[in-house]
Amino acid sequence: MLRDDINNAVKEAMKAKDERKLSTLRMVNSTIKNADIDARGNGKPPLSDADLLGVLQKMIKQRQEAVELYDKGGRAELAAQEREEIAVISAYLPKQMADDEVNKAIADAITETGAAGMKDMGKVIAVLRAKYAGQMDFGKASGLVKAALSG
């Protein structure tokens, strides 16, 4: 379904002659195809929508890192280009959870798994990934889970 949305957006961008959006969406399609090929090589089926959300989040993270580097290097035009790409890619992610929602989801996952210490962190993160793929930053969530389990 997400693939269809992206392919339809490519067609719309072509008709509207929106070069930035078109090139970004083509790059997204290329990344998705590469991830599918990689999965097939490992004997897995094509990526599901939840897996695609992870791919999109990774693309956004890469662009955010590039923005930081371009800003430090005084390359404002390249940083602006990366920000535009982030905006296009972000449109295909579900709404991100607020901090209080993330904390509640972590507390619920800890209760659900019966996690008692750091050795159970993987179980909690697995539950969060299954339920909230694309809705939270798992880098931040990981630190929050760690704090909740150690304190």
Image: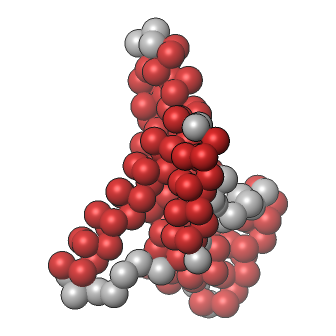
Residue 30 is situated, as x and y percent measured from the top left of the image, at 35, 57
Of residue 136 and residue 87, the one placed in the foreground of this image is 87
In the rendered view, how is the structure colored? secondary structure
Which quadrant would the N terminus be assigned to in this image? Answer: bottom right
Quadrant occupied by the C terminus: bottom right
In-image side of 64 versus 106 (left or right): left
- Lateral position of residue 33 relative to residue 42, left or right: right
Residue positioned most to the top: 74
Residue shown at 78%/57% (left/top)? 98
Residue at x 57% of width, y 32% of height: 83
The one nearer the camera, 55 or 118, is 55
* Number of dots carrying numbers: 0
Where in the figure is residue 107, as x and y percent of width and height?
72, 75
- Taking depth in this image into account, of 143 and 16 the one nearest to the observer is 16
Please say whether residue 116 is visible from this viewpoint.
Answer: no
Viewer-closest of 13 and 66: 13
The percent coordinates of residue 142 (x first, y second) are 53, 62
In the rendered view, tell whether residue 118 sits above or below residue 31. below
- The correct choice, above or below, for 128 with respect to 59 in the image is below
Residue at 69% over, 86% down = 111
Instruction: Residue 75: give x, y in percent of width and height.
Output: 45, 13
- Residue drawn at (50%, 16%) of the image: 77
- Is any atom of residue 44 visible in this view? yes
Q: Residue furthest front?
A: 15
Classify 62 as above or below 143: above
